[in-house]
Image (cartoon, helix red, strand yellow):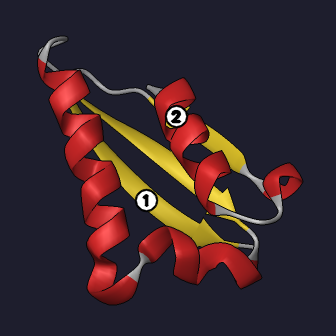
Amino acid sequence: MKDLVEFIAKALVDEVGRIEISEIAGNQTNIIELKVAKEDIGKVIGRQGRTADAIRTILNCAAAKLSKRYILQIIDE
């Protein structure tokens, strides 16, 4: 799932080298933290959070096959 989020984030941001992704695993729920440059945070979140919601939807659809739940946290540096 980290690879999926990384692929999407790289397509959205200008400063690809400043993307950091970490995954915190739990029993049923995993948290993925996406850190991007301050200048790119708006591109990842999108207008009224639509882009972030779309990324979360794709992530949860992919996670449904694994019977897991993923939470995406977007953090600026």
View extreme (top): residue? 66
Give neighbour class at mark 1: few <14, some 14-19, many 20+ (Cα, 10 Å): few
Q: Residue at left 24%, top 21%?
A: 27
Horizontal and vertical percent position of residue 19: 74, 52
Q: Nearer the viewer, residue 75 or 65?
A: 65
Q: Which mark is residue 73?
A: 1
Q: Is residue 38 left or right of residue 34?
A: right
Q: Amino acid at mark 1?
A: Gln
Q: Is residue 71 visible?
A: yes
Residue 45: x and y in percent read 44, 74
Residue at 60% from the left image edge and 77% from the top image edge: 41
| Number of the label disc, if any, that sits on residue 52 | none
Residue 70 visible within the image: no
Q: Residue farthest to the right?
A: 17
N-terminal-most mark, 1 or 2: 2
Percent x, y of residue 25:
41, 27
Give the residue drawn at x 76%, y 72%: 37
Q: Is residue 74 above or below residue 22?
A: below
Image quarter of the C terminus: bottom right
Instruction: Using the image, determine if residue 42 lies above or below residue 63.
Output: below
Disc 1 element: strand
Q: Secondary structure at mark 2?
A: strand
6 relative to 14, above or below: above
Figure quadrant of residue 42: bottom right
Give the residue type that dot 2 points to: Glu
The residue that mark 2 highlights is 23
